[in-house]
Image (tube, grey):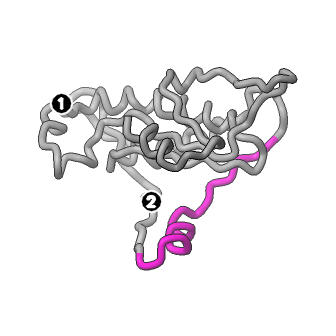
Amino acid sequence: VILPRNLAKAASPASCAVLANAAHLSTLLDAAGSPVGFDRILADVPCSGDGTARKNAQVWRSWGRRECLELFVKQRNILQRALNLLPDGGICAYSTCSMNPVENEAVVLSALRRWRREDGRTSTVELLDACAAASRLLPGMSPAAGVVQWLVPSPTRGGPLFS
């Protein structure tokens, strides 16, 4: 609801917001039947919302490790579809409001490890340094680097932790 309103303010014919099952978003075709690529994609995926707990205490009442782990597959599938919709040289920004590395770093790592184009073309995906880009584009902002190791809980309470 907020993104379409903000895009409308920009009044740019070169942007759109899509509310759909993003993991299965259809390829758009132009009048000649050629696929339309998106130069930039913001993949703002569904998440547990644990990063909003400071302003919304209800998050902790409904948060569960099983639901969080189930979101991982949905998030990865959306990110992989977004990467496949990009032309070579396009940029995808992956976004959640979660602080959980299973929903952030682990999703990105898994998508990069499983990368292949759906159309069989050869292309590469490169992880950009978001901290350097943010520092360059937003002077005065001091972003934190992502984590490189994390624990994954068992879906059941009291179960083991995996690294």
Q: For residue 162, which quarter of the picture?
A: top left
Residue 50 point in image, percent of width and height: 26, 43
Circle 2 SS class:
loop
What residue is pinned by disc 2? Answer: 146
Q: Who's the residue at 64% across and 41% down the image?
A: 13
Q: Is residue 119 left or right of residue 42?
A: right
In this rendering, the answer to whether 81 lies above or below 134 is: above
Please state the extent of the stretch shown in magenta in the rendering: 123-140
Residue 91 seen by the camera: yes
Q: Who's the residue at 31% across and 40% down the image?
A: 161
* Residue kind at label 1, given as amino acid type: Ser
Residue 83 point in image, percent of width and height: 65, 38
Callout 1–callout 2 Cβ contact below 8 Å: no
The residues tagged by marks 1 and 2 sit, at their Cα atoms, a distance apart of: 26 Å
Whichever of callouts 1 and 2 sits on the residue coming sooner in the sequence is: 1
Q: How many marks?
A: 2
What residue is pinned by disc 1? Answer: 62
Residue 101 point in image, percent of width and height: 39, 48
Which residue occupies the foreground of this view, 101 or 18? 18
Residue 100 point in image, percent of width and height: 34, 46
Q: Is residue 78 left or right of residue 40?
A: left
Q: For residue 69, which quarter of the picture?
A: top left
* Residue kind at label 2, given as amino acid type: Gly
Would you say residue 124 sits in the magenta stretch? yes
Which numbered disc, 1 or 2, marks the residue closer to the eye? 1
Which residue extends farthest right? 32
